[in-house]
Image (cartoon, rainbow, N blue to C red):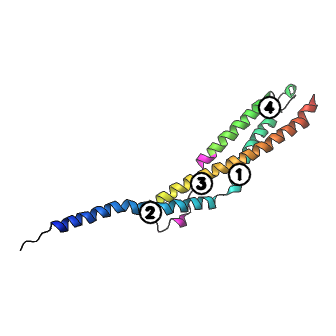
Amino acid sequence: MKTNLMPCSSLLAFVMVMLLLSLPLTTLAQQIPAEGQAKQDAEANLNKELWMGTGCAFPLLTTLGLVAGSFGPQSSRSSLFSGPQACGFCVGLTSAYLGRHVLIRRHQPTPPPERLLGKSPEYIAVYTDVYKKRSRQLRGQYIDRGYLIGCVVSGMLAIVINELFFENSE
């Protein structure tokens, strides 16, 4: 008695191919909730006040450079915006610009470990990558907002210092 194994083997091959093709879909299905959860956690764990305050402090370095430069030679104290003061302003502005970029790049956010317990390695990799990217993006946004606020405050402070100490010194 001869049995025909051909339909059985083609059915088995079809099932194996379908299983292989469905694995990436399963991984993709795990990535979608991982991305959403990572973005939510990055937003929830961000200390907005700290990063905005840090951004606000950078322009104040510029004003501090202006004021520190004003205590140079007494002959050039006609204005806050001339001579050594301009040099102090440039030093402050450069330190503010570099400080922002160094701070964002050097500080590496770490996802909360309790969110990763019992998850697959693919889920952990996607979650960690999205969490770090979103955290850096949010930090940059809050530093920029603080920087704008600090620019307004330091600009007004520089004008007040100029009016109080330098316009009347002639």
Which amino acid is tagged 2? Answer: Ala
Q: Residues within 10 Å of mark 3 (few under 14, many from 20)?
A: many
- For disc 3, the marked residue is 135
Label 2: state its secondary structure.
helix
* 105 drawn magenta: yes
- For disc 2, the marked residue is 29
Find the distance from the CA under tag 2 to the CA under tag 1: 36 Å
Part of the protein shown in magenta: 103-121
Q: Residue furthest top?
A: 75
Apparent side of residue 119 relative to residue 37 in the rendered image (left or right): left
Find the distance from the CA under tag 2 to the CA under tag 4: 59 Å
Q: Residue furthest front?
A: 7
- Residue at left offset 20%, top offset 64%: 10
Which amino acid is tagged 4? Answer: Gln
Task: Place residue 11 in its image quadrant.
Answer: bottom left
- For disc 4, the marked residue is 85
**Mark 3 or mark 2: whose residue is earlier in sequence:** 2
Find the distance from the CA under tag 4 to the CA under tag 1: 27 Å
The answer to whether marks 3 and 2 mark residues whose Cβ atoms lie closer than 8 Å is: no
- For disc 1, the marked residue is 52
Q: Residues within 10 Å of mark 1 (few under 14, many from 20)?
A: many
Q: Nearer the viewer, residue 152 or 70?
A: 152
Find the distance from the CA under tag 3 to the CA under tag 4: 37 Å
